[in-house]
Amino acid sequence: MVLAVAFLPLLIFPSLLRAEEGVESPVAKKVWTVRISTFSIPDNAWNFTSYLKEKGYNPKVVRLYDSKGRLWNAVQIGDYPTRSQAKASGRSFKRKMKLDYVIKGMNAKFLESRIATSRKTPLPVNPTVIKAVRSANRPITPVKVGATPVAENITPINLEAGTEEFFYEIDQNDILRAVSQRQREIILARVMMRRGQVYDGLRLYEKLVKTYPKDMDLREEYISTLIDNEDYNIADRLLQGWLDDDPIAGGALRQSARLKLLTGDYGQQQASLNYILRLRPGDTDALSSSAYGRQEGGDWLGAIENFSELIDREPNNVDARRALSGLLKQYRPRLSFVPRVYLQANDTITTSLSTNFSMQLDKVTRADFVYDFADIYRPEGEGIEKVDKTINRAAFLLRRELSRKFTGVVGVGAFEGSAEGFTGALGFDWMVHKSGPLSFMFDYNNPWIDEPTATNYKGRYNQVSLTYDGFYNDTWGLFMNGQVRQYVVDNDKLYGTKGIYNFILTRKLLSEPELYVSYSYYRSHFKYDDQNYTPIAVVQNESIHTLSTSFSKWFCETLGFQVAGGIRQDEFKGSPSYFASPNLILRLGERWEFNAGYEYSSDSGLVGGGESQLITGGIQYVF
């Protein structure tokens, strides 16, 4: 029994020993990586990688053993051919994330073998076992044994390169160890906040600030987190104490300016940042805060000016470039065309083209001119009324920012085809909190075209709607909508009233590529005004549960792909229905964008049921 135990490692690892003794190792290719931290608890490493992915990085978990045989989960970004490239990446990472790093050179094949692709990736072989086999002071004689799963799954590795990686890269004297305890706890605090463990995360930040009282970056991060969590009173008290000790502390002035912005004191926020820029002209942190503050405060012209100066000083600042590009796209004049072909049951075809021209009239007012064309055709059939109508509609819409959080909307228009008349719109968008707006809209005298038969009876509708659309911590989305529609036909004869409410809960699972899952509930009830006059068949009751998912991936800055799909169950129908919609997007520079899409649904939602297909396109040009 003792002999069996003694020989067990020799039986399991003969291929490893033969690889070392009988195979001459080629010159190993070396790559350089940026190591952020190491964790003994795997879940902490994986949670941290999720956090980094949300920040736009592509981190890897690398499993390494130290000289005592303990497994560590190292989180690294990048694999560069030169040390200088890795250092440049590390400096950029530290500037953005306020975290330390070390540059590590590693055998490329060894690194590849130690990258874990998921939490379920099998653990690598512990090198201390191999070391013990090496040191056995006895000859190794081949022994024929039955194949074991362990031996079969082991791939021979270059132990010469492996030894340095095992016993030097994670060594007790590794410089990373000197900062890792502090850094691991900072990372843990960030992950706690991201996962909604707010109380524990803030308590850990508080402990870290007391442990490292001279770390001003850490103090600023704690106060910033308090502000993110809307603990404004605590943040203000800490900032006052900090500024009493050091009236020109950059971090305190930046966070004080941010706090003033979020509490509605936009003027004081910009005054504080201007004070910093007078003390330290060209301070990129202050420029960045001023740019984002102006953007959030509605001063888009000032934000464009600040972002432009920031990019001049930091040409590689990707976030600033994206923000500037987004502002220019949002506030420059733009023209879009959206053609559609909608195929429904009974050979119904609706062809439409929507044209929109939008431009900024002044600092707080934006105008939209909309022209819609729709051609609806359905042949006559048994019990089916023929439809052949063309509807043209033009409208002019104004949006004016009345305050930083409140935008008024007013519109007028006209249409002809199924009927003739004027349309109107009046409403507002109210940013009740930073996660999303509450919107109210009253629409008057719109053409009724979603039921094709309604166009033969000069169908129109008036609508009142209330909508909330919020997204929390870049993870959870909540959409709620309620509508009341009043339908009229012919010479303003009331046809019926429809009440609708819709609820959608969305969870973001991945950031790059983007992956979302959603649950929605839709309820509607239609009541005829006169049960003896019902020439237009309308679905009277719907109660629909939907599970769906959407995926989007950008292959490069030019080409992107989106796909969505799901399954629906209407409580008033026996069988479920499903839908799917792929979409392709092409961007040419900052001005042109094209897209083409297709949607299939096994239930059109009309009284007669039947499948539907929608073919869409789109062209947008930013001037």
Image (cartoon, grey):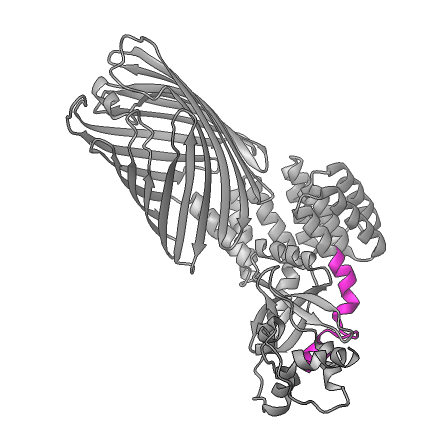
Q: Relative to residue 18, is residue 211 depicted above or below?
A: above
Q: Is residue 299 left or right of residue 598?
A: right
Residue drawn at 38 percent across, 28 percent down: 574
Question: In this picture, which residue range is highlighted in magenta?
Answer: 161-185
Q: What residue is rendered at 69% in x and 38% in y?
A: 230
Residue 454 drawn at (x, y percent): 25, 21
Q: Nearer the viewer, residue 231 or 34?
A: 34
Q: Give the camera-side residue of 89 and 528.
A: 528
Say which quadrant the N terminus sits in. Answer: bottom right
Which of the pair 404/77 is nearer the observer? 77
The answer to whether 120 is drawn above or below residue 578 in the figure is below
Is 180 magenta? The answer is: yes
- The residue lying furthest to the front in this view is 1
The location of residue 89, given as percent across then percent down, is 60, 68
Does the segment drawn in magenta span residue 469?
Answer: no
The residue under the point 71% across, 79% down is: 9
In the rendered image, which quarter is residue 38 located in? bottom right
Q: Residue at x 45, y 49 (%)?
A: 551
Observer able to see residue 429: no
